[in-house]
Image: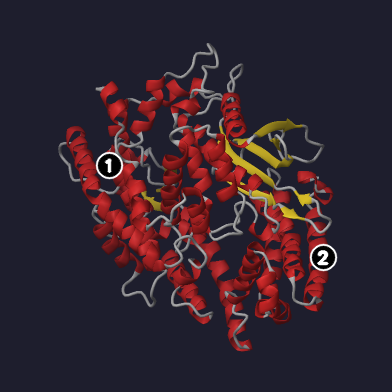
Amino acid sequence: GLFGVPELSCPEGFQEAQDKALQESEQLVQKACSTPPGPETVMIFDQLSDSLCRVADLADFVKVAHPDFAFREAAEEACRNIGTVVEKLNTDIELCQSLRRLLADETVMSSLDPETRRVAELFMFDFEISGIHLDEEKRKKAVDLNVRILDLCNEFLIGTHLPNKIDKHVLPEHIRYHFTAEGNYLQVAGLHADCPDDLVREAAYKIFLHSNAQQLRRLEDLLASRNSLAQLVGYDTFAHRALQGTMAKNPETVRQFLEKLSDQLSKRTQKDFEMMTKMKMKLNPHNSMLMPWDHPYYSGVLRAERYNIDPGLYCPFFSLGACMEGLNSLFSQLLGISLYAEQTKRGEIWSEDVRKLAVVHETEGLLGYIYCDFFQRPDKPHQDCHFTVQGGRLRENGEYQLPVVVLMLSLPHSARGAPTLLSPGMMENLFHEMGHAMHSMLGRTRYQHVTGTRCPTDFAEVPSILMEYFANDYRVVNQFARHYKTGQPLPKNMVSRLCESKKVCAAADMQLQVFYAVLDQIYHGKHPLKKSTTEILKETQEKVYGLPYVPNTAWQLRFSHLVGYGAKYYSYLMSRAVASMVWKQCFAQNPFDRAMGERYRREMLAHGGGKEPILMVQGMLQKSPSVEDFVDALVSDLDQDFETFIMDS
C-alpha cells in the first residue's frame, strides 16, 4: 500500500483507514475524559491528534499528487470527513473540560516539563479559537463561520486561477497570437511577465487583473467572516488571532517591521526604478513611464545585460546526482547525517520515478524517510513543496514513530543519454525543500502535534531559506558542481556572478513583497474596512510600492496567498531576516563547521514547534534580535560584494 500503509493498496482503502482512525479517536476521547489531570492527558490528546493526522496528512498529499483520479478523489473525501470530525472535537465541551482541569491544576502544571506545558496550551488554543468558551448559540455561530470560511477559501482560490476572456477584436491583430483563442474570444490566463513586447504585457495585466464582481464579493465575505469569527472568540481583529504564538506575536510588531523595512528600502528602490526606466526608454522611446507590468520584465533585462547569466551554461554542472551528493556531503559534515537510497515495496510509491531515501545519523541510526517525487508528469501541480505524511512522536511503548515526508519538485525528465540537469534556480529550490525535510527529520519532539515543521509560519521558513545561503556559497557548490561530461568544476567567478546577479533590482523586488505584506495586514486588520478592497489596494500600492495603480484592475482578486497565509504574508520576509542573521553569524566563516551544525540542531531544529520561536532564535544567535536587527539583516543582503564587483569591472 501507499507509504507502506496496507489499507491503501486501492482507493477504497481510504474509507477503511478513515473508519479505523475515527474508531480509534472515539476511544481516545473517552479515555481523555476519564483520565485524572496529569502528563497522561497531554499524551492522550497527542495520540488523538496523531490518529487523525496520519490519515489527513497522507490524504492531503495524495489528493494533489496521485496520478490516479480515483485515488485523488478518495483522498479528497477523506480530508473533508476528517476535517469535519476535527471541527466537532474542537467544540466538544467534555473533551475540553478534561484539558481545562489539567491547566487549572497548578500543582500538576508546575511539575510538567516546558514542552508538555506548551503542547497542552496549544491544544487549549485550538479549542478557544473554535469558540468553546462561548454559550451554545455563539458556539454554533463559530462552527458555522468556520465552515463558511472554509468554503469561501476554496471558492476564492479557484477564482484566483481562472482565466479572463475578452473579445479578440479589442486587441491589435499582431499581439493576438500570444493568447489562446476560443471562437471570437481570447483567453488570458496569466500576466505574460517575461514577454519582450510591452503591449502584450500591458494587455495581459489589464485583462487578467480586470475586476470581477463575483470574486470581489467572495473576498469581501471572506475578510468579513474571518473578522467576525476572530471577534466572536475574543480577539480585536483576525490578525491578532492569526499572530498568536508566532515570532512576531502581534500586528503592531509586524507593522513596525514592515514600516522600518520600507523606509530602509525606499532610496534603493527608487534607484532600481530609475534604472528600469532608463532601460525602458532605451528599448521603447515612445513610452518610457514605468508601469507595474514592466518591473519583472525590465529587472530581468538589466540582470541579463549586466551579468549575462545563461542558465544553459550552468545546467551541465548541476546534474541531479551531483546536487544530491552535495546535499549528502553537506549534511554529513554539518550534522553527521547521510542519505541512503532504499528499495520500495510493491504499491508503496505512486509513480515509478519516485525515490525513497533513508535519513541515517552516524550514531543515532535511522531518523526517518524522505520520498523524492522530483519529476514532471501530467496532472501533477507545478509547485515545489514539502509534505509531512507522518509526524514523529514518542509512542506509548517507548519506540519513536519515525517522521515520513515527501519532497515534490517539477524537474524536467532527462534527455536520452544525459542525466537530469538542474538550472541554478532548480538547484536552489532543491536545497530549500531539503531544508524543510531536515527540519522534519531533526525536530524529534515527544509530541506529534509540534513535530518538525509544525511550528509558527514565520519560523517555518527559516531552515529552508538558510539552505539557500548554503546553495549560493562557492565553498559548498565547489564540493559537488562538476560538468557531467568532463568532470570539470564550476569556475568560482560563475558562482559569484550568479549571486551578484540576484542583487540586481533586489530592493524593488523586496519592496513589492513589503507592499503585499502591508496589504494583507490592512485587509485582516480593523473592520469594517474604511474603503473598498480595491481602493485600499490603490492607496497602499502608491504609498508603499511606488508604481502607479492601473484603473479597473484588482490585483487582490489574484492574491491566492490570502487563503493559506491570511495575516501572515510577512512571514517569508521575517524568516529570511532570521536565516540571514544565522548564516552571517554562524556559518559564513565556515559553512561546514560541525560545532555550529550541532548548535543549529540543538537550538533551532530539535524543538519543532515545541518551544517559543523567538527563544529558539535567541538560543542560536545568543542574543535577542530587535526589529531593527531583522531589517538590517535583510537590507545588508542587498549590498554588492566588492570583490566580485572588482573582478567583473
Q: Which residue is mark 2?
A: 24
User: Residue 533 at what x, y percent from top left?
Assistant: 35, 67
Single out the residue that lies furthest toward the left.
286
Q: Residues within 10 Å of mark 1 (few under 14, many from 20)?
A: some
Q: Is residue 55 left or right of residue 504?
A: right
Q: Amino acid at mark 1?
A: Leu
Question: The N terminus is located in which quarter?
Answer: top right
141 shown above or below 563: below
Q: Residue at x 78, y 32 (%)?
A: 343
551 shown above or below 359: below
Question: The C terminus is located in which quarter?
Answer: top left
Q: Is residue 392 left or right of residue 375?
A: right
Q: Residue at x 82, y 37 (%)?
A: 346
Q: Residues within 10 Å of mark 2 (few under 14, many from 20)?
A: some
Q: Residue at x 61, y 88 (%)?
A: 135
Q: Residue at x 30, y 57 (%)?
A: 260
Q: Based on the displayed image, in which of its 4 quarters is residue 301 positioned? A: top left
Res 439 visible: yes
User: Residue 198 at what x, y percent from top left?
Assistant: 27, 40
Q: Nearer the viewer, mark 2 or mark 1?
A: 2
Viewer-closest of 355 and 335? 335
Q: Amino acid at mark 2?
A: Glu
Q: SS of the residue at dot 2?
A: helix
Measure the C-alpha gap from mark 2 to mark 1. 60 Å
User: Residue 231 at what x, y percent from top left?
Assistant: 48, 79
Q: Based on the displayed image, in which of its 4 quarters is residue 193 positioned? A: top left
Res 158 visible: no
Q: Which residue is mark 1?
A: 199
Single out the residue that lies furthest toward the top.
486
Q: Earlier in the sequence, mark 2 or mark 1?
A: 2
Q: Circles 2 and 1: CB distance less than 8 Å?
A: no
